[in-house]
Image (spheres, rainbow, N blue to C red):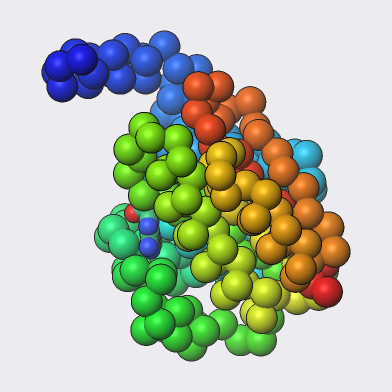
Amino acid sequence: MKKNKISKNWVNKQRRDIYVRQSKVHGYRARSAYKLIEIDEKFKIFKGGLSVIDIGAAPGSWSQYTLKAAKSGKLISIDLKKMEPIGNSVQIQGDFTEERTQEEIKKNINGKVDVVMSDMAVDTTGIKDIDSIQTGELCKEAMFFAKDLMKENGYFISKIFMGGTFNEIVAEGKKYFKEVKVFKPKSSRKDSKESFIICRKIR
Ligand SMILES: C[S@@+](CC[C@H](N)C(=O)[O-])C[C@H]1O[C@@H](n2cnc3c(N)ncnc32)[C@H](O)[C@@H]1O
């Protein structure tokens, strides 16, 4: 398929998409907000005063929802890309997989945090196994980082792609957390292999 045909299809899909329209009405920067909202509706994670780390945060809709739902808590948002400011959150621009970015995050937290969440994704190739492996590696890195920084009852939430690495990631999650669930929100596109892992209670 030619490139301009693909982008025309993408534009048409966006126009028809109810979550794209809703995000404009509610002032969210991306339709991704509704995935986190559905996760929160199901698992009842966010409440006032939580401290949250949002990895792969740009353009910022998860962080926007977090600030609304975890009023007066602390939020640190990290991304490769620069983001427009979001309330009083701390923003770190950098590659999460680099040690210096992780050190900078640690410098910005006092004690342990309630939620670490990652919506990090590389640009998808459309090749199922490659997308699953690349996103899986980012998820594992975030999980490894999170387990030492989280309160005992804290939550770790991460995007994963169904495919070759799925079982390995769930097994890794079970090594560090007592509760591990996988959930695909309705707002996650049906034709996408995307899903989310929700882990709770550090072992
Ligand atoms: C699906 S978007 C996140 C959308 C976001 N949750 C929201 O609600 O606006 C994925 C993001 O992951 C970021 N990302 C990918 N690899 C990263 C890395 N190694 N370090 C930091 N951010 C990364 C991308 O730059 C991109 O902005």
Q: Quadrant of the N terminus?
A: top left
Where residue 171 appears, as percent x and y from the top left, is 72, 58
Residue 62 shown left or right of residue 2 in the figure: right
Residue 148 shown left or right of residue 2 in the figure: right
Q: Which residue lies at the image location 37% right of the left edge and 84% below the top edge?
A: 100
Where residue 13 appears, as percent x and y from the top left, is 37, 15
Q: Which residue lies at the image location 65% right of the left edge and 34% below the top edge?
A: 184
Q: Quadrant of residue 16?
A: top left
Q: Which residue lies at the image location 15% right of the left edge and 16% below the top edge?
A: 2
Q: Front-most of 78 and 134?
A: 134
- For residue 54, above or below residue 119: below
The reply to whether residue 22 is visible in this rendering is no
Q: Front-most of 78 and 163?
A: 163
Where residue 175 appears, as percent x and y from the top left, is 76, 68
The reply to whether residue 99 is visible in this rendering is yes
- For residue 82, above or below residue 61: below
Q: Quadrant of the C terminus?
A: bottom right
- For residue 80, above or below residue 198: below
- For residue 130, above or below residue 92: above
Q: Quadrant of residue 73?
A: bottom right
Q: Which residue lies at the image location 28% right of the left edge and 14% below the top edge?
A: 9
User: How many numbered marks, from 0 up?
Assistant: 0
